[in-house]
Image (cartoon, helix red, strand yellow):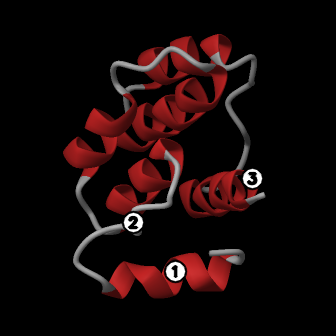
């Protein structure tokens, strides 16, 4: 999978592609409407990439304090983007 369009097309499948990183699997489940499964993908991970996705998920949940904690762990600042735009930005970043 190389493009955002490819990733979005994969949302028609029942499961994410096996070759996806854990971060992309999390974003895939999020796009499918399964926040809890998305969160479970990154919840126990402490690397910067997973922290960034974790931050986004808590922002989406509306838990801003927790989101800001994870943005800080990821060395990021909470963006002034819509959630949809941040999701696309994350997917594009992790597809590279």
Reading the image, the residue beneath label 2 is 31
Vertical placement of residue 43 versus 24, above or below? above
Residue in the picture at 55% in, 24% down:
51
Expressed as whole percent of the image width and height from the top left, the position of residue 26 reads 40, 49
Q: Which of marks 2 and 1 is nearer the N terminus?
A: 1
Q: Earlier in the sequence, mark 1 or mark 3?
A: 1
Residue in the picture at 69% in, 60% down:
95
Q: Distance between the residues labelled 1 and 3?
A: 14 Å
Expressed as whole percent of the image width and height from the top left, the position of residue 80 reads 73, 43
Label 3 or label 2, whichever lies nearer to me, is 3
Contact check, label 2 and label 1, Cβ < 8 Å:
yes
Front-most of 28 and 86? 28
Front-most of 38 and 79? 38
Label drawn at residue 93 = 3
Q: Earlier in the sequence, mark 3 or mark 2?
A: 2
Q: Distance between the residues labelled 3 and 2?
A: 16 Å
Q: Distance between the residues labelled 2 and 1?
A: 9 Å
Residue in the picture at 51% in, 44% down:
23
Front-most of 80 and 6? 6
Expressed as whole percent of the image width and height from the top left, the position of residue 21 reads 52, 49
Q: How crowded is mark 2: few (under 14 residues within 10 Å), some or many (20 or more)?
A: some
- Judging from the image, what secondary structure is the residue with disc 2 in? helix
- Judging from the image, what secondary structure is the residue with disc 3 in? helix
Reading the image, the residue beneath label 1 is 8
């Amino acid at each position: 999978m190389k493009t955002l369009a490819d990733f979005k097309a994969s949302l028609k499948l029942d499961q994410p592609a096996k070759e996806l990183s854990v971060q992309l699997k999390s974003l895939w489940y999020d796009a499918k409407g399964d926040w809890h499964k998305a969160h479970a993908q990154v919840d126990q991970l402490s690397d910067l990439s997973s922290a960034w996705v974790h931050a986004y998920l808590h922002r989406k949940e509306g838990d801003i304090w927790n989101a800001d904690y994870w943005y800080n762990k990821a060395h990021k600042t909470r963006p002034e983007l819509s959630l949809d735009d941040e999701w696309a930005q994350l997917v594009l970043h992790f597809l590279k």
